Amino acid sequence: MTGATMPDATQSDGTPADPRLQRIAELLTLRADGQYGLHAITQRQHALQAGWLAERQGCPEALIVASLLHDIGHMVHNLAWHRRPA
């Protein structure tokens, strides 16, 4: 992004400066502990694994973020889909 500047990522207390990032952090902290489908991992672990794999493959930053957040809607809407078989 030519000419664009990134705001400071965190405030002095360590929380994200952007309220959207704060909300994402809250969702991944507070609502991602449920089992991911029938797998022996949590929703948070699944999200982090997807993002890590994209990063490891050398994907662009936007794809890494998309990989990390691809199931965020389940947490936003508290669908509790992790309680049902995948």
Image (tube, helix red, strand yellow):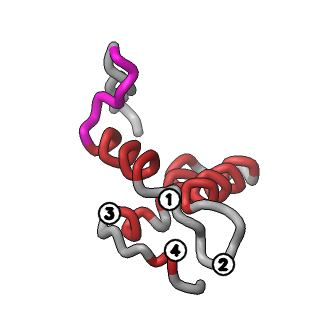
Report the residue marked by disc 1: 66
Asked whether the beta carbons under mark 2 and mark 1 sit within 8 Å of each other, the answer is no
Which disc, if any, is residue 82?
4
* Crowdedness near tag 2: few (<14), some (14–19) or many (≥20) residues, C-alpha within 10 Å: few
| Badge 3 element | helix
Provide the residue span drawn in magenta.
13-19
Q: Tell whether position 14 is magenta.
A: yes
Seen from this angle, which residue lies furthest top? 12
What residue do we see at 37% from left, 68% from top? 73
Is the residue 19 above or below the residue 54 in the image? above
Report the residue marked by disc 3: 76
Amino acid type indicated by mark 3: Val
Amino acid type indicated by mark 2: Leu
Report the residue marked by disc 2: 38
Is the residue 38 above or below the residue 64 in the image? below
Asked whether the beta carbons under mark 1 and mark 4 sit within 8 Å of each other, the answer is no
Q: Is residue 23 left or right of residue 69?
A: left
Between circles 2 and 1, the one closer to the viewer is 2
Give the distance between the C-alpha atoms of the residues marked 2 and 1, in whole angstroms. 23 Å
16, 38: nearer the viewer: 38
What residue do we see at 42% from left, 56% from top? 31
